């Protein structure tokens, strides 16, 4: 069971990184933040997985990306 939890955390982290990258690009191009359905559609994951990644993903390694 531990392996499953670790794998899900890694998946959340991967999706969270994709979300942050997409948010940055979208804001640069369009000047506003996208909605969750827009993010899910462009990343290719479900809205639920996007929301779970925002909640459970690790942001420590991504902090410089978010702040700039």
Image: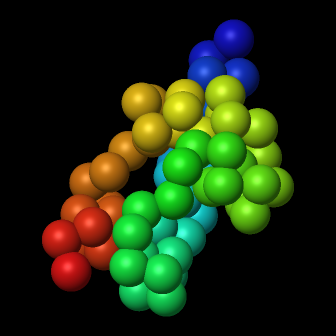
Q: Residue at x 54, y 33 (%)?
A: 51
Left or right of residue 31: residue 45 = right
Residue at the extreme left: 67
Q: Position of residue 21 (x, y in %)?
A: 50, 72
Residue at the extreme top: 1
Residue at the extreme bottom: 29
Left or right of residue 25: residue 58 = left
Left or right of residue 36: residue 41 = right
Q: Quadrant of the C terminus?
A: bottom left
Image quarter of residue 48: top right
Looking at the image, which is closer to me, 37 or 55?
37
Q: Position of residue 3 (x, y in %)?
A: 68, 25
Q: Position of residue 10 (x, y in %)?
A: 59, 44
Looking at the image, which is closer to me, 15 or 60?
15
Q: How is the image coloured?
A: rainbow
Image quarter of residue 57: top left
Residue 65, placed above or below residue 12:
below
Residue 48, placed above or below residue 50:
above
The number of numbered badges drawn on the structure is 0
Q: Residue at x 38, y 44 (%)?
A: 58
Q: Quadrant of the N terminus?
A: top right
Residue 18, placed above or below residue 45:
below
Specify whether residue 29 is in view: yes
Q: Position of residue 5 (x, y in %)?
A: 61, 22
Q: Residue at x 68, y 35 (%)?
A: 47
Specify whether residue 14 is in view: no
């Amino acid at each position: 069971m531990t392996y499953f939890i670790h794998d899900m955390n890694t998946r959340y982290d991967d999706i969270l990184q994709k979300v942050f990258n997409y948010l940055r690009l979208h804001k640069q191009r369009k000047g506003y933040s996208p909605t969750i359905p827009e993010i899910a559609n462009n990343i290719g994951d479900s809205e639920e997985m996007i929301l779970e990644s925002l909640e459970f993903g690790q942001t420590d390694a991504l902090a410089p990306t978010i702040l700039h």
